[in-house]
Image (cartoon, rainbow, N blue to C red):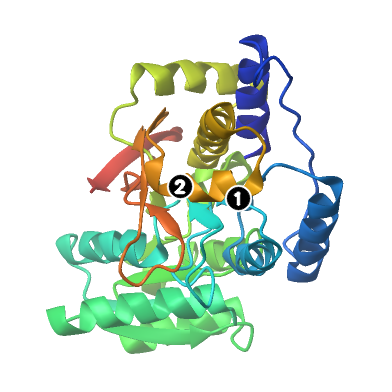
């Protein structure tokens, strides 16, 4: 995400900045900690930033969004997906990533189309994982699907295998942290002969990242995950992908495109209205920016408490077992 943000800032400044002034990116690492996120928002607000951008972790983004809304600081959330990003409707917060209910329902459609109706989730305690489990269960149950929840960390990876075999599931979804316990569970399941035909899935997107392939090798292939990219990038998206590939020395994930698009939107708003925070927040419903993955516009969406791009493209993809460095698109919406 940071690479995408930095690339877009550099391009804005190479083109003359905002009204002749350079755009400055002030970075604070929340370290996936809600308390650090709240402190960072307070600090950045005191420093006089024009807007807040970024955040990847949904639970952390929820804390940042609530604090930004309370302080009157515009926040364009790049990547977090929890539907209820704020408890109450927020005027100061907009989001680029599709809401979790949108993406995970697409994933549920993929499961059904692939013939999986008896599904286990290995889930850690978290509002994000609990929300994902609920979305899957609510969507699959009326369509004949069953979701069996295996609680982590109470169950060790070997015990997860026993539960999978006993319950005759055909798919296991990893709703668990990366690298562990997700990586450990994959290794154990792959080596259990009772589970040779089971599909492992990771809807939160862990297999997208290069470290997944490094840690798991061939075991990390063939694990479907969600990512928010179109089937074919636009000319802008292709140009940004080339630049990011050179920047990162690896294939950029969808999160890098989310970072780039965040700055593209904010730069457009700042050009039009300057650094006035209230005018930035008021401009969310009038945004119309060509991003790397399509035309970005925000609206009020039923059940979503923030201004939402409805919708970023959604894919289910995996790493090709024949060539783990290559991604296959399995399903798209």
First of labels 2, 1 by sequence position:
1
* Farthest residue, direction top: 15
Q: Residue at x 39, y 71 (%)?
A: 172
Q: Is residue 192 visible?
A: no
Q: Residues within 10 Å of mark 2 (few under 14, many from 20)?
A: many
Q: Quarter-wise, where is residue 255 in the image?
A: top right
- Badge count: 2
Position in image of residue 27 (x %, y %) = 79, 42
Q: Quarter-wise, where is residue 279 in the image?
A: top right
What number is the disc on residue 139? none
**Is residue 22 shown left or right of residue 332?**
right
**Is residue 159 shown left or right of residue 227?**
right
Position in image of residue 309 (x %, y %) = 38, 49
Position in image of residue 315 (x %, y %) = 32, 46
Depth order, front residue of 294/245: 294
Are the residues flagged by discs 2 and 1 in contact, CB closer than 8 Å?
no
Quarter placement of the N terminus: top right
Residue linked to disc 1: 278
Residue 248 vs 321, above or below: the answer is above
Q: Residues within 10 Å of mark 1 (few under 14, many from 20)?
A: some
Position in image of residue 88 (x %, y %) = 50, 76
Label 2 vs label 1: CA separation? 11 Å
Q: Quarter-wise, where is residue 69 in the image?
A: bottom right
Depth order, front residue of 154/332: 332
- Element class at badge 1: helix
Q: Residue at x 62, y 82 (%)?
A: 156
Depth order, front residue of 5/211: 5
Residue linked to disc 2: 284
Residue 122 vs 241, above or below: the answer is below
Q: Is residue 90 visible?
A: yes
């Amino acid at each position: 995400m940071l690479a995408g943000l930095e690339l877009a800032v550099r391009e804005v400044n190479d083109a003359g900045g905002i009204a002749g002034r350079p755009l400055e990116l002030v970075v604070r690492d929340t370290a996936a900690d809600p308390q650090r996120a709240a402190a960072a928002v307070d600090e950045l607000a005191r420093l006089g930033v024009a807007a807040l951008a970024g955040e990847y972790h949904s639970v952390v983004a929820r804390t940042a969004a609530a604090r930004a809304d309370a302080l009157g600081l515009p926040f364009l959330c790049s990547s977090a997906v929890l539907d209820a990003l704020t408890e109450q409707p927020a005027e100061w917060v907009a989001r680029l990533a599709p809401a979790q209910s949108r993406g995970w329902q697409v994933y549920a459609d993929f499961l059904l189309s692939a013939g999986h109706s008896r599904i286990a989730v290995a889930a850690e305690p978290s509002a994000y994982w609990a929300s994902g489990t609920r979305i899957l269960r609510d969507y699959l149950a009326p369509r004949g699907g069953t979701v069996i929840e295996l609680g982590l960390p109470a169950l060790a990876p070997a015990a997860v295998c026993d539960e999978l075999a006993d319950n005759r599931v055909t798919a296991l979804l990893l709703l668990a942290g990366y690298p562990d316990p997700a990586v450990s569970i994959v290794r154990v399941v792959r080596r259990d002969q009772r589970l040779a035909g089971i599909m492992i899935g990771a809807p939160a997107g862990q297999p997208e990242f290069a470290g997944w392939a490094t840690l798991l090798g061939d075991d990390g292939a063939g694990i479907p995950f969600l990512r928010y990219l179109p089937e074919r990038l636009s000319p802008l998206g292709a140009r940004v992908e080339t630049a990011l590939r050179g920047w990162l020395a690896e294939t950029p994930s969808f999160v890098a495109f989310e970072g780039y698009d965040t700055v593209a939107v904010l730069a457009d708003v700042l050009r039009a209205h300057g650094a006035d925070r209230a005018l930035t927040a008021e401009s969310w419903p009038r945004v119309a920016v060509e991003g790397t993955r399509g035309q970005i516009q925000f609206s009020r969406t039923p059940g979503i408490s923030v201004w939402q791009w409805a919708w970023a493209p959604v894919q289910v993809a995996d790493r090709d077992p024949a060539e783990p460095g290559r991604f296959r698109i399995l399903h798209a919406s």
